[in-house]
Image (cartoon, rainbow, N blue to C red):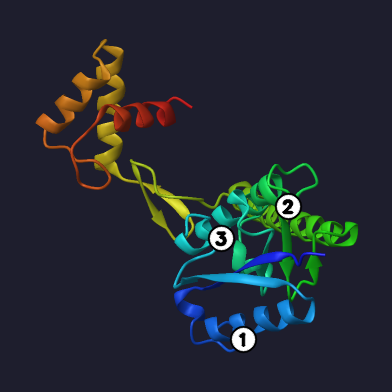
């Protein structure tokens, strides 16, 4: 029976290059030991040095994935799942294209640290559980953040950037007289039928600057009008 041909993949980000257990040499050693232990044919090892796991757009990873697409390799082997990606969405994409039961490429994923072998039902289950847990963690963090922001709003604390017309004093907004006058002018010009472009031009002509000290644009005027009429 022919051995499974695997393409190894290693990655380090800039911050991890000197960390114990994350060096490229350490990862490669683990891949070679794993391949020998499970009688896998390691056809090559692709590497991304100093590359973040936030995107799949990495030359080494794309070369490894191309080997799966072309049939040059039957599987990909990593030391740990986060070497492939740290993104739940990107992992789901890889499963759909390569490692899922209905994936067109019908490739196998091996992960040394996570003990994943997607040739087996147990391996596929572990992979899906890990992805689901990661998704749950991300959604939980988002919910906690939203709850904290909602609480701040409830007790009157300002959340986000300071809007035109105000400055931040501690955690609360305090009106700025000059900018409040500019808002009144914007409302007045709009009520007179002037267009957003004409209002922006008039403000610039009068020497009134935006919050960032720049020239006025249509969208800036539109945003201020929307907030003022809420």
Query: Secondary structure under badge 3?
Result: helix
- Picture coordinates of residue 100 (x, y %)? 76, 48
Which marked residue is nearer to the observer: mark 2 or mark 3? 3
- CA separation in Å, label 1 and label 2: 26 Å
Residue matched to label 1: 21
**Could you say whether the residue bearing mark 2 is in a helix, strand or loop?**
helix
* 137 over 230 or under it: above or below: below
In the image, what residue occupies the spot 43% across and 49% down?
Answer: 173
Which circle's residue, 1 or 2, is located before the other in the chain? 1
Q: In this rendering, which labeled residue sits more in front, label 1 or label 2? A: 2
**Quarter of the image holding residue 211?**
top left
Of marks 3 and 1, which one's residue comes earlier in the chain? 1
User: Residue 99 has which mark?
Assistant: 2
From the viewer's side, name the closer residue of 118 and 86. 118
Whether pointer 3 and pointer 1 mark residues with C-beta atoms closer than 8 Å, the reply is no
Q: Are marks 2 and 3 in contact (CB under 8 Å)?
A: no
Query: Which residue is identified by label 3?
Result: 64
Can see residue 124?
A: yes
Q: Residue at x 14, y 32 (%)?
A: 204
Q: Is residue 9 visible?
A: no
* Disc 2 packing (10 Å; few <14; some 14–19; many ≥20): many
Taking the view exactly as shown, the residue that stands out farthest to the right is 122
Q: Going by the image, does 60 lie left or right of 128?
A: left
Badge 3: how crowded within 10 Å, few (<14), some, or many (20+)?
A: many
Left or right position of 225 against 149: left
């Amino acid at each position: 029976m022919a051995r499974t041909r695997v393409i190894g993949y290693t990655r380090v980000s800039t911050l991890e290059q000197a960390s114990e257990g994350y060096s490229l040499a350490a990862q490669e050693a683990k891949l070679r030991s794993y391949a020998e232990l499970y009688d896998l044919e390691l056809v090559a090892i692709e590497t991304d040095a100093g590359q973040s796991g936030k995107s799949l757009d990495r030359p080494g990873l794309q070369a490894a994935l191309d080997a799966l697409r072309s049939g040059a390799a039957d599987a990909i082997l990593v030391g740990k799942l986060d070497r492939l990606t740290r993104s739940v969405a990107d992992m789901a994409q890889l499963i759909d294209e390569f490692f899922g039961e209905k994936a067109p490429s019908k490739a196998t994923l091996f992960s040394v640290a996570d003990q994943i072998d997607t040739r087996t039902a147990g391996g596929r289950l572990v992979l899906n559980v890990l992805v689901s847990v990661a998704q749950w963690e991300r959604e939980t963090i988002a919910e906690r953040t939203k709850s904290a922001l909602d609480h701040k709003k409830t007790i009157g604390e300002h959340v986000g950037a300071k809007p035109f017309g105000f400055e931040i004093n501690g955690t609360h907004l305090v009106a700025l007289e000059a900018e409040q006058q500019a808002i009144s002018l914007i409302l007045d010009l709009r009520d007179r039928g002037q267009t957003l472009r004409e209002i922006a031009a008039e403000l610039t002509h009068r020497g009134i600057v935006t919050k960032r000290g720049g020239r006025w644009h249509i969208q800036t005027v539109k945003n201020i009008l929307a907030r003022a009429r809420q």
